[in-house]
Amino acid sequence: MTAESKNVENDKQQLRTGLWATVNERYPGSMITKSDFVALAKSKKPLSESRLTFVSTAGVQPKGSLPFDTVHPIGDYTFRCVPSDSKPSDLEIHQLKYPTSGAERDINVIFPIERLQELQAVGLIGELAPNFFSFIGYNMDAEMLERTLAEDLAEAVEAEGSDVALLAPA
Amino acid sequence: MQRAIEKRGIPTVSITVALDVTEHIKPPRAVFVPFMMGHHFGVPFHKELQRRIILDALNFLATTERSGEIKMLPWNWAQARQEGKLIEEQFRLKS
Amino acid sequence: MSLQYLKEAVAEGDNESLIRYVRLHFGDGNEAAGAKEIDKAWIEALKLLLDVPKTDREFILETLAEKDAATLAHLFFHLHFYFVERSGEWIHDGRV
């Protein structure tokens, strides 16, 4: 933990501490560390005129789509498109690595599709991209993740003309 | 992932519950909430909290000045859970 | 690279690291839990055969003869989780 994160008040601290180190100890080399920062892209429009997409590692997928491969020892490097007008009852979760106790009762705690639909309906968000995107976070091969999944997904996001992307890495 | 999208010219912001992982990965912008894994937007049926977290993240996106900034959001887990329980109780009373 | 780490362990015949990895995978990051999970899957499979029910051996032999080894390996991982789930004791709730 860095000095910066140590200084925050107790109740504002990460609940599950030392996560990076724990995972990296269990799965050596699977965690990514970057030493550089990417240049910031500029927002071109106010939010109320922007097309927004949402990207999640929560393993959320439309019912009936090919389930994420949660048993593969090296991981699953595919993603699913989740139509942004889906209802929670259209969706299901396939993953094994984070607690879904809340999401089982209300999927919006990890995939806030209804809240995004409401924000769009009242005009705070201009429009929602046709699809949101989802994959699973269990991926042993960090290099392959960056080379294939990250690029494939970024391309899909770009192809739908999104002006802004909200992400929730579970 | 986030870096790949940002590199294509689309501004991004993520919501994280794992500050240490985010500090390693160095996404362009992130907001941190001290919540349980898998509960980035709070607790079940707490619509207002879920909504506020989305808006906090999106507002931060518009004001970030340097890449790698992480904003600590003022929410706290114990309070979120308490409020969630209350909301569920009221919901049960109504139905 | 983590995959690199596993490949190096294979190249060096470092079975200690490999079995540790397999147990971590099945145990959601907990080696002892993973070892128990492997036992659980085998016990569940064994229980199903105690009464010597009729099974589809043709399907089994055909599958083994016709499918490539990687597909069978993938199936093996699926079968592990299938039997663990059947056992009624599911530890994969993301909390370990």
Image (tube, helix red, strand yellow):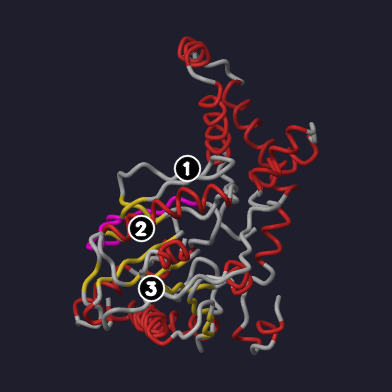
Q: Quadrant of residue A4?
A: bottom right
Q: CA distance from mark 3 to mark 1?
A: 30 Å
Labels 2 and 1 touching (C-beta < 8 A): no
Q: Residues within 10 Å of mark 1 (few under 14, many from 20)?
A: some
Q: Quadrant of residue B19?
A: bottom right
- Which one is in front, C11 or B77? C11
Labels 2 and 3 touching (C-beta < 8 A): no
Asked if B59 appears above or below A90 in the picture, the reply is below
- Percent across and percent down for residue C6 are 69, 40
Chain ID of residue with mark 1: A
Q: Residues within 10 Å of mark 3 (few under 14, many from 20)?
A: many
- Which one is in front, A96 or C4? C4
Q: Horizontally, is C38 left or right of A147 in the view?
A: right
Chain ID of residue with mark 3: B
Residue stretch in magenta:
A82-95
| Nearer mark to the viewer, of 2 and 1 | 2
Q: Amino acid at mark 2?
A: Phe
- Percent across and percent down for residue A48 are 23, 82
Q: Horizontally, is C95 left or right of A25 in the view?
A: left
- A90 is within the stretch colored magenta: yes
Local secondary structure at mark 2: strand
Tag of residue A69: 1
Tag of residue B11: 3
Q: Amino acid at mark 1?
A: Asp
Tag of residue A30: none
Local secondary structure at mark 3: loop
Local secondary structure at mark 1: loop
Tag of residue A133: 2
Q: Amino acid at mark 3?
A: Pro
Q: Residues within 10 Å of mark 2 (few under 14, many from 20)?
A: many
Q: CA distance from mark 2 to mark 1?
A: 16 Å
The residue located at (41%, 80%) in the rendering is: B57
